[in-house]
Image (cartoon, helix red, strand yellow):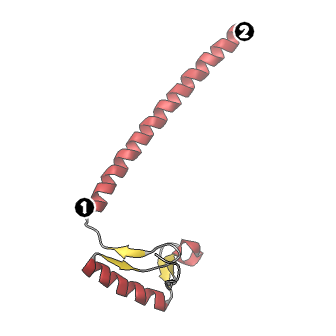
Amino acid sequence: MSNDKKQYNVCDGIMFSDHEDYLVGDKEGLMKMKEAIDIAINNGEAEFVTDEYEGIRCVDTSLFEQEQTETIFEKAKGWLYMGFLYLMIVAAGTKFYEWIKALI
């Protein structure tokens, strides 16, 4: 999308300590977001330019269910990988210690 589009003041509130758990915006930005949400619900997508986003999309619920399943699997895979690395480091450290001890 081109840069000459009007940007609205809506963002993740994490930038502001009093609003870190909220989506924040000025009145104009929130009203335009509301309009864009209605358009996205009816048409599947709507333009809504902010510093962080270019638009709003309405997607099927299954997308979130699929991502959650993948996330759980990815976390388990990551923990198994980290456990394997830990065991390899311990094993390598033990061999290194034995090698140093043999030199002394």
Q: Amino acid at mark 2?
A: Leu
Q: Secondary structure at mark 1?
A: helix
The residue shown at (31%, 61%) is 64
Q: Is residue 86 left or right of residue 96?
A: left
Task: Give the camera-side residue of 21 and 53.
Answer: 53
Q: Is residue 69 left or right of residue 26?
A: left
The residue shown at (35%, 79%) is 46
Residue 99 placement (x, y as % from top left): 66, 12
- Observer-side mark, 2 or 1, equals 1
Instruction: Identify whether 65 is placed above or below 91.
Output: below
Residue 23 placement (x, y as % from top left): 46, 77
Instruction: Identify whether 32 is placed above or below 46.
Output: below
Q: Earlier in the sequence, mark 2 or mark 1?
A: 1
Q: Amino acid at mark 1?
A: Ser
Task: Name the residue that disc number 2 marks.
Answer: 103
Task: Name the residue that disc number 1 marks.
Answer: 62
Q: Secondary structure at mark 2?
A: helix
